Amino acid sequence: MFKYCINKVLELIPTFVGISILAFGLIRLVPGDPIMLLLGERGADPEVYREMQASLGLNKSLPTQYIGLIKNLARADLGTSIISKRPVWDEFKDRFPATVELGMCGMIFAIVIGIPFGIIAALKRNGPLDYFLMGTSLIGFSMPIFWWGLILILFFSIHLGLTPVSGRIAIEFDVPIKTGFLLIDTLLIQGHDKYAAFLSALKHLILPSIALGTIPLAITARMTRSSMLEVLGEDYIRTAKAKGLPRRQIILNHALRNALIPIITVVGLTFGSIITGAILTETIFSWPGIGKWMVSSITARDYPVIQSGIMIIATCVILVNMVVDLLCAWANPKLRGKY
Amino acid sequence: MALIEVENLAITFKTQKGEITPVRGITFNLEEGESLGVVGESGSGKSLTNLAIMGLLPPNAIVTADKLLFNGQDLLNLSDFSWQKIRGEKMAMIFQDAMTALNPCYNVEFQIQETLKIHTSLNRKERLERCIHLLDLVGIADPNSRLKSFPHELSGGMAQRVMIAIALACNPKVLIADEPTTALDVTIQDQILKLITEIQEKNKMALILVTHDIGVVSEFSKNIQVMYAGEIVEKGPTKEIIKYPRHPYTQGLLNSRPGHSVIFRERLPSISGLVPDMRQRPLGCQFRPRCTFASENCERPIELYPSQFAFEKNRSEHNSTMMSITTPSVRQIRCIHPLEGERNA
């Protein structure tokens, strides 16, 4: 177990080098210049321009700049935003819980609905219900998030007026930030309006979670179906029947338990897509998370934010994958001894 | 009343190419404590018949029978709930490949306890004791530590022993062993079969031992039932059938296994040809296309009938050798011109 973790951490090093080169290089390939954006449309005095360039360290050669970045990262210094002048870490800290909250809710939505859908489809294989569920999930899978999010807003928020259009919570609630997760923070408020605040936060979460969770849901449902179908044909399912177990117990204890092993892997892999999905979803729903932050930083060519932001996001994805690996090992007794 | 009564059982599958009936006209009784061997080559419908008795056939199989009774209870129109009461508790089954028949995600203890949990009112401690007792019974050394083993940590023979322990958990009245030793080494095969028959005798349990090896049956079960192309072609007491096979197929099976009379370096005789395609069954006797004794008469439909021994007439002359033979009406065959006399090996 310990050795496994060490190995994983060592594997991270080349991954980080690769990601940092990409993060550093790609943004510099994009035309545009943060200083020009800072100084405004009318252009600037070349003197002022050079001064700013020097103060931001952008007048040095690219390799020097890159080495500077690595040196800073090694000292756990993520740099300072060019636009807001605040440390990147502070900016990140404020926004990250919002994204995690949204991502978790999206994932929960995907798993809680996707796995039962997959099970039902597998049990009713080739029946009308199976075709309906799998057809629906195929549509869900092919749906572009930006379009799907807008349709959800148009229908549920504007047409039916059921949910708010954007943001994390209604303006009238003043929630002191403790954990950063509004669902928890609202419940920590002292006073009688805490449930109202919680409900408001929950309502704001529903549509973005659906928009974000639809593609993972479709993947989960299809994966669950095929994995269940495979497992249901196994000999040990027949053994379970021969033991006289009730159907429910056969399906949940014996079939699903084994089917979960590949499902965990796939769900873990979709976590990466949750982050990319969050960029779109957060933009559509004005969700103050890191997705929206990255988009606005890219527009502003805020180099330090983009570089460090990408590094942090990549770290998160890698960490999640490590957790998924461990979960897989836990789910599969054959792998347990190997870690 | 017999424990299991089967009359005219047929199994039909609906496939895209039409209906096929791989098993038909099966009639037999199994008494309490009786051991019955079922022999036949692959595709003869042995396993299907037993899965039908356990109600474990896939949903696309249609089971029809004039009678399919367990302990007087009709198995044909049984609700799921009533099946759950019978399976595992009164009827248990051991499968061919124990490695795949055990759930890889659960340890031995869980898999044995599960049966006890549903069918008995034992508490946790009693269940654990029963598990240890069962593992001990099936000859697993150090049962306490084996309880926590997962299937992939067991050898094939050990896994089959665990399967037997699971099957025996609730002291079933019938144990159906569907080729329990096919996936095992020859040395282990014998041990497992001895174990099964020992427990069968001790618990006064009825046993159906399915195998494609007639040699196995000859040692381990009292009665034998030979199946071919989904039909019973011959049945009776094992000793008699081994010595005086009457159906040409039975003789073929007996001759194609290595015995004492085999001269080394000589090829074992085999039955030429293949089991008929279930979509195009031959007329009359199913074995006719492969039978060396076949005649035109064999195309007429034939049912299983009680056979009389031709050699019985000579009983007085050979009194000493015939003493062990039970009443002749026990034997039944499905052949127009049954073989006479001792097997010509």
Image (cartoon, rainbow, N blue to C red):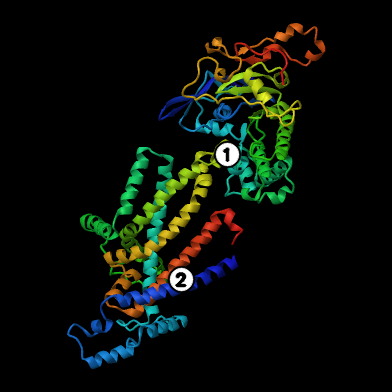
User: Where is the C terminus of chain B found, in terms of image quarters?
Assistant: top right
Quick one: which residue is furthest to the front in this view? B265
Quick one: label 2 or label 1, which is nearer the N terminus? 2
Distance, label 2 to label 1, CA atoms, is 45 Å
Residue B167: image quadrant is top right
Q: Position of residue A300 (x, y in %)?
A: 27, 77
Task: Specify the amino acid type for callout 1.
Answer: Thr
**Total number of numbered labels?**
2
Q: Nearer the viewer, residue A338 or B345?
A: B345
- Mark 2 or mark 1: which is in front? 2
B109 shown above or below A63 = above
Tell me the SS state at disc 2: helix
Residue B49 placement (x, y as % from top left): 56, 27
The N terminus of chain B: image quadrant? top right
Chain containing the residue with disc 2: A
Left or right side of A267 for A135: left
Residue at 24 percent across and 59 percent down: it is A150
Instruction: Determine crowd level at label 1: few under 14, some 14-19, many 20+ residues with C-alpha closer than 10 A.
Output: many
* Residue that label 1 marks: A239
The picture places residue B108, in percent across and down from the top left corner, at 64, 47
Q: Which residue is mark 2?
A: A15
Is B166 above or below relative to B33? below
Disc 1 is attached to a residue of which chain?
A: A
Question: Image height check: is B215 above or below B138?
Answer: above
* Nearer to the camera, B149 or A244: B149
